[in-house]
Image (tube, helix red, strand yellow):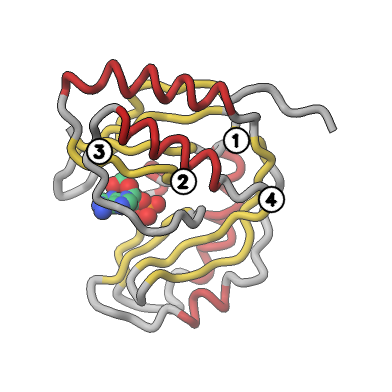
Amino acid sequence: MRLFAAILPPPEILDEVAAALAPRIRVVEGLRWVDRSTWHLTLAFYGEVADRSLPDLEVRLARAAARHPVKRLAFAGAGAFAKRVFWVGITGDPLVRLADSAAAAGRRAGAVQTDEKRFHAHLTLARARHPTDLRPLVEALSSFAGSPWWADSIHLMRSHPGSAVRYESLGHWALAPAERS
Ligand code: 2AM
């Protein structure tokens, strides 16, 4: 089965992103917008994982979650990957260490990782079928700044491919309590 680890932001935080996006949706034509019900922050992409590896992966993700404190995050600004992917970004804790741990959990459980790009926290909102100049859209969202929120758990997500991709959370594990400052 096709799996990835993700953070699912709270609905009211995604409402803010949706509200900022709505008036700008026509700034660049011809994009495939990601359905709001599937918005997520990918931590690690595992690709196809054998059914028998699932219990091990779950144990390792639970362990990884317990090692990292909850994260204070806020959506802010926007960007593009390779003229293909339009996203809004994250300020605050950049999630890199948590993403590294989630990736390591997958590797140790035998997942074939097909994505070795350097981790960059983002919420994908649209994809272009052909290379497209996404800069007008990126500029239109550049001053977007959402409210802060707590990322408090990691989800193991299953991707059901099809004409409309569907994601299913197979389980989630709480991050550790906030560190005292
Ligand atoms: P992204 O949209 O946040 O970039 C589920 O497929 C998710 O895993 C995608 O939404 C994508 O996250 C991420 N992903 C990373 N590498 C991938 C790959 N090689 N193929 C498909 N999805 C990948």
Q: Which quadrant is the N terminus positioned in?
A: top left
Q: As shown in the figure, which amino acid type bears the numbered disc 1?
A: Ala
Front of the two marks 3 and 4:
4
Q: In the image, residue 86 lies at what x, y percent?
A: 42, 67
Q: Circle 3 — which element?
A: strand
**The CB of the residue at mark 2 lies under 8 Å from ligand 1:** yes
Question: Which is nearer the N-term, disc 3 or disc 1?
Answer: 1
Q: Single out the residue that lies furthest toward the right.
A: 181
Contact, mark 2 vs mark 1 (Cβ under 8 Å): yes
Q: In which quarter of the image is residue 130?
A: bottom left
Q: Single out the residue that lies furthest toward the front.
A: 108
Q: How far, Cα to Cα, is label 3 from label 4?
A: 28 Å
Q: In the image, residue 55 lies at what x, y percent?
A: 28, 16
Q: How far, Cα to Cα, is label 2 from label 1?
A: 10 Å
Q: Which residue lies under the disc numbered 1?
A: 151
**The CB of the residue at mark 3 lies under 8 Å from ligand 1:** yes
Q: As shown in the figure, which amino acid type bears the numbered disc 4?
A: Gly
Residue 81, compared with residue 171, is above or below; it is below
Q: As shown in the figure, which amino acid type bears the numbered disc 3?
A: Ser
The residue positioned 48% from the left and 37% from the top of the image is: 8
Q: Can residue 159 be seen in this view?
A: yes
Q: Which quadrant is the C terminus positioned in?
A: top right
Q: Can residue 34 be seen in this view?
A: no
Q: Circle 4 — which element?
A: strand
Q: Which residue lies under the disc numbered 4?
A: 92
Q: Circle 2 — which element?
A: strand
Q: As shown in the figure, which amino acid type bears the numbered disc 2?
A: Leu
Q: Which residue lies under the disc numbered 2?
A: 41
Q: Is residue 178 or residue 152 the one in the foreground?
A: 178
